Amino acid sequence: MRRRDAASRERDNAVPQIPQGSDQSTQQTPRGPPLNSTEGVHQGYFTELTQSIMTKAAPLSTEQFSATDVNRILMEFLMYLGRVFLLCYPIYLTGSFGLSISWILLSLLLWTMWKNNRKWKDVRLDSAVNFLENERLMVDKELKDLPAWIDFTDIEKAHWINKILQQAWPFFGMFMEKLLKDNIQTLVRTSSPHLKTFSFTKVHFGQRPPRITGVRVYTHEVDNREVVMDLNIVYDGDVDIDTEVKAGIVAGIKGLQLEGMLRVILEPLIGQAPLVGGVTMFFIRRPTLQINWTGITNLLDTSAFSFLSEPTILDIIASLMVLPNRMCIPLVDQVKVDLMRFPLPRGVVRVRLLEAKDLMAKDTFMMGLVKGKSDPYAILRVGNSQFKSKTIKENLNPRWDVSYEYVVHEAPGQELEIDLFDEDTDKDDHLGCFQLDLGEVKREKQMDEWFELKKAKTGMVHLQLQWLSLQTDPGLLVETPQGSACAMLAVYLDNASNLPRDHSEFSHHEKHGKHSKEAKLTRRRNNPNSYVEFSMDEQTQKSKVAYASKDPVWEEGFTFFVHSVSNQVLNVQVKEPENKCPLGVLTLPLARLLNTSDLTLDHRFQLERSGANSIIKMKATLRILKLEKAEPKPVANPQPETQPQPPAAQNQQRSPPAHAQPQASQSGPAAPESGPSNGLYAEYPRQRQYDGPQTAPSTPSNMRRFDSHSMLSENSIASSRMDLSDRLPYPEAILNHTGSFGEIQLTVRYATLRNKLMVLVNSCRNLFPCSENGSDSYVRIYLLPDQSWTHRMRTPVKKRTVNPVFNEKFEFSVSLEEAKSRKLDVAVKNNRMFYVRERKEIGMVLIDLSGLDLTKGSTEWYELTLPGLKTTN
């Protein structure tokens, strides 16, 4: 306030300086009423406030706020002042009239009750509308415990499996009790001298067995010699296990919850009993786990130690049964366990993260009064492989343009998970997520699409995905300078033998018969603890630790991306966890694999800088990455390219003689075999064909070529109307138009819970202008073959625009099977008066619903055409 008063006094006392040579009378004559001191104070305060808002909103950048932004901020501030005035003025009136304060309290009470009632009413209406428009998402959110077969039609119920588990569960408990007490208890006692008295005092697996909520069997996407099943497992067990570590020290588990998707593969199928060579089981993703601890382990339920329990156990489960690890049970002797546990991956997917748009703004200024932008970055994950992109500062439409490569072990099954975050100093805000089954990428080979983000109000991400197959032909090897991988190396680490106890056994720096001081003070072990470290340039992976064995067995698989086969080398080191010095090393040039059979090297390798008989057994397999090309999509009406005609011939074709027009209208529909057909001629009655004045030959050979989204033919378009203007000629402007008639965006999906087909007319763009101000357009829809006036759907008229936005929704009460056999007839028309003897159509499109995934829904742009008219771009 002092600063404001000082500024106002300084302005009031300031004497305006008059330039030399100017007329004082002119300068002293005011052009408006003079400002008093109060108005000067207000004007100075408003100017300082505006400058303060602009300074706080953008202290370091002049490009953040334009004149429109400043006007918006000022309008928000003025509206805030208006609200304050409306709230304070009734209090002033109450004091002026000498009324009691009870009137103010009563008014506030009534206003609060009305506001709360209006708030709950808006919430109920929004919930109803949201549920109506997003039925599947709302069901997934509110009814999370529903079985999987309710959501997906290809997932079946598994009552018979649950009945078998219910009947066999007590016997499974007896088996597990014997296994724990006879085998596991002995292993725990021998693992450490502090656990010599460890014992299971109580083992009870309860009465509630695991439940299989859904079974999905793959038949088309897999090999003919295997059966692939996905089991959704939910286990909420009343298990009760007590152990005694030492006298008085008791630990146990009482209650266990596990949920996940277990994949079961029966392979290979053979022609003799038992018909299946082996069974492979694994979790595609980490399952969720919750444990209720008892005894001394009850501390693990607290927030301070909870990270030591469930994540540790999940790591153990992941090392056994989460991809790429598998649990294998061979049923015949001819099946190799290593091939079952670590088969070659299905392929490699290359993901190019291009950009995102319309992200949510999470950064705010002035306590949320001014919305800023976000600092987005992306996390991409496939299985245990994860990458993080760079952060783009203050941008709601960031562009990264980075590529990542992932090894795919199971497709379909594995998913690409993308999470977008706003980077902050304290906690990053979530901007949305997206999941994509990699089986779809394997089927499509290449994808370049915008994907809508989930768990976000707005936002889309642009991805390019490529499927790379694994080949054994060295001639396909192409090294790219852009840094993309050209090959993949798969390493299967089996075992090692005759490892030295420590590096002193093979050290050449020690003299015979003498020991170092460290060796004298260190207690010698009989056998070493060892693990293997693989490294290739910047890629490093480690195996698990094999304890107290000079012949360790690891049986693990690893994969590496290769960028230059001729130059890169695989470095193998056998190490001790306690010491940095390796127990043995091995160097394997990748170029050596190019000269082997099937690009595979399976040997026992002699370790260097190790014992004389120290050997490591492993298998290295090289596969060339080949970019698969997308299969060309079938075109609904393939047309041979027409030769360009001279101008004279074109004019003659556009304006044929009057006596030739009836003949063309009669012979075109009657003989569709004279040109290529898209199979839609027989769907409409011939007597309803358009036989009015023709402006171009009506044979399909002169029609333009359409894409797969709109399978159109001249006869089907012209014959699917019930309007009175069908036999009228087109306007002269449309007849002379040779460009595109525009596009329409439609969203088509099926609401399974309501058994209705939903058609959303979103907008149109680049429509043909019927006048200088645009077109008064509307959209008419039929669900063929229903063409009566009662089945006619239309939108309101959008006047004087060529890019109308409708956002209208229409519903058709048909079953899903029936909807897939229907076709959607859409026409964009110009709203004309009744006396105009011309056709209203601006453009039309016929959509075959059998080619759409109605359950997931699709939003696409469709090109508009007109029957009997040729359009060229």
Image: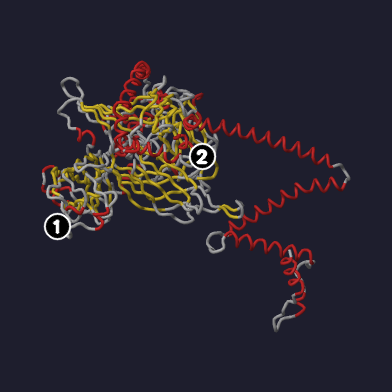
Secondary structure, mark 2, is strand
Secondary structure, mark 1, is loop
List x then y, in percent, for residue 856: 41, 32
**Residue type at tag 2:** Ser
Residue at the spot 56% in from the left edge and 61% down from the top edge? 58
Residue at the spot 64% in from the left edge and 33% down from the top edge? 120
Residue at the spot 25% in from the left edge and 58% down from the top edge? 517
* Image quadrant where residue 695 sits: top left
Q: 280 left or right of 125?
A: left
Say if 357 sits above or below 271 in the image: below
Residue 98 in view, yes or no: yes
**Residue type at tag 1:** His
Residue farthest to the bottom, as pictured: 21
Q: 680 left or right of 623?
A: right
Distance from disc 1 to disc 2, alpha carbons, whole Å, reads: 99 Å
List x then y, in percent, for residue 108: 76, 40
Q: Nearer the viewer, residue 472 or 741?
A: 472
For mark 1, what is the residue? 512
Q: Quadrant of the N terminus?
A: bottom right
Q: Nearer the viewer, residue 237 or 326?
A: 237
Say if 230 sits above or below 357 in the image: above
Q: Give the label on residue 777, or none.
A: 2
Residue 561 in view, yes or no: no
**Crowdedness near tag 1: few (<14), some (14–19) or many (≥20) residues, C-alpha within 10 Å:** few
Q: Give the label on residue 266, or none.
A: none
